[in-house]
């Protein structure tokens, strides 16, 4: 008789010897969910020569890490990674599988959901355990209809229950004080004849921007009309990052890596300064965990003000220069005091 599914798994995506930030964020959430339902938080690690990464993952408080180590897993390739992940899932039967909504994570999640004929809740903004028909099930919160609704989705039948989560939604796990978990090396046979693609060369884009880790974030929207000069200057003075709404990105005013919101990235800055943004739900979920939100908008009825701690009604092209001058003056004053 097959055993009941058990374990909340996190796909431990990594690149060049380091975990993707979203993997650490999902470890923290998996531990929280496991505590809520009396389960265990475990990791799924695929790669080549991955033993050191497995030990590192235990250091974040996982109860166990299942490792598939094979030369054919050196680089992410859909077929090889799907084969390996599916083999481990078949063998160990996890109840839940959480995957970061990265390019590779989305690719793998979709393949696995089809293979196991299970549900996949994509781009979740929250995860929690809910009682349903005598069971504790994973509920994934997603927004829809242009941000007009928020729905909780469950998967009562298929296993594993699956969800993808965008980077920056949850706070990353901190190293645990004591590690009691174990690494389980799994023998996985990957059929090379079923791998239809081969990586000949890798070229990774390098970027100094990471809106998910910014302490200060200055965000522009439709109201900028494409002029991000003041936003960029204020972000530079604050040693922060520039962010943007989907409209600003779609118009080509800034690059996609700066997009905040449901279809972009989530961030937890100490201060978010939002300029010329209407405030639709699909945007505000990206900065909902900010320490303070300051909004500048010429419309006194802007929905963005409902999500803000401080509201400045007026022309951003007049307010931003004044704010920049104040920041510059404050910096000069601190420099004089430090001499």
Image (spheres, rainbow, N blue to C red):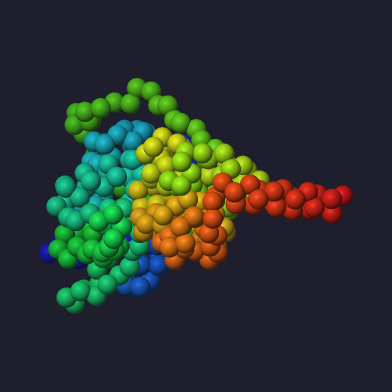
Residue ID at (36%, 67%): 33
The picture places residue 236, in percent across and down from the top left corner, at 63, 43
Which residue occupies 24% across, 75% down?
131
**Picture quadrant where residue 149 is located:** bottom left
User: Left or right: 56 with respect to 67?
Assistant: right
Q: Is residue 73 left or right of residue 50?
A: left
- Number of callouts in the render? 0
- Residue that protrudes farthest toward the left in the picture: 1
Pick the residue in front: 248 or 261.
248
Farthest-out residue, top: 200
Give me the residue at 21% from left, 28% from top.
196
Along the line of sight, which residue is nearer the eye, 137 or 299? 299
The answer to which of 9 and 289 lies nearer the viewer is 289
Please indicate, yes or no, whether residue 3 appears anywhere in the rendered image: no
Give coordinates of residue 321: x percent, y percent.
63, 47
When asked about the image quadrant of residue 65, the answer is bottom left
The vertical placement of 135 against 63, above or below, is below
- In the rendered image, the quadrant that contains the N terminus is bottom left
Residue 242: x percent and y percent?
53, 44
Q: Is residue 127 above or below residue 255?
A: below
Observer-nearest of 20 and 229: 229
The answer to which image quadrant residue 84 occupies is top left
Q: Position of residue 311 (x, y in %)?
A: 53, 62
Question: Furthest-right residue in view?
Answer: 339
Q: Is residue 30 left or right of residue 300?
A: left
């Amino acid at each position: 008789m097959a055993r009941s599914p058990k374990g909340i798994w996190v796909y431990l995506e990594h690149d060049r010897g380091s975990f993707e930030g979203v993997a650490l964020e999902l470890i923290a959430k998996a531990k929280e969910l496991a505590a809520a339902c009396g389960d265990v938080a475990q990791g799924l690690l695929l790669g080549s020569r991955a033993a050191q990464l497995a030990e590192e993952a235990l250091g974040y408080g996982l109860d166990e890490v299942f490792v598939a180590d094979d030369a054919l897993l050196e680089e992410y390739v859909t077929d090889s990674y799907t084969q390996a992940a599916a083999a481990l899932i078949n063998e160990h039967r996890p109840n839940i599988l959480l995957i970061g909504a990265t390019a590779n994570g989305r690719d793998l999640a979709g393949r696995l959901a089809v293979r196991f004929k299970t549900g996949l809740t994509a781009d979740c903004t929250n995860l929690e355990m809910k009682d349903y028909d005598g069971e504790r099930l994973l509920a994934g919160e997603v927004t829809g209809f242009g941000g007009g609704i928020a729905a909780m989705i469950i998967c009562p039948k298929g296993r594993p229950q699956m969800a993808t989560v965008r980077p920056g939604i949850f706070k990353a796990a901190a190293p645990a004080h004591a590690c009691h978990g174990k690494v389980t090396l799994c023998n996985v046979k990957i059929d090379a004849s079923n791998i239809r693609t081969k990586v000949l060369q890798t070229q990774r884009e390098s970027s100094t921007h990471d809106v998910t880790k910014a302490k200060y974030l200055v965000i522009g929207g439709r109201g900028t009309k494409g002029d991000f000069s003041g936003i960029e200057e204020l972000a530079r003075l604050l040693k922060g990052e520039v962010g943007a709404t989907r409209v600003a990105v779609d118009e080509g005013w800034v690059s996609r890596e700066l997009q905040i919101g449901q279809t972009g990235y989530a961030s937890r800055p100490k201060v978010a300064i939002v300029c010329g943004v209407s405030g639709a739900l699909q945007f505000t979920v990206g900065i909902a965990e900010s320490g303070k939100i300051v909004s500048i908008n010429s419309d006194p009825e802007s929905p963005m003000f409902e999500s803000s701690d401080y509201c400045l009604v007026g022309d951003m092209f007049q307010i931003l220069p004044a704010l920049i001058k104040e920041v510059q003056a404050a910096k000069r004053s601190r420099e004089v005091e430090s001499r």
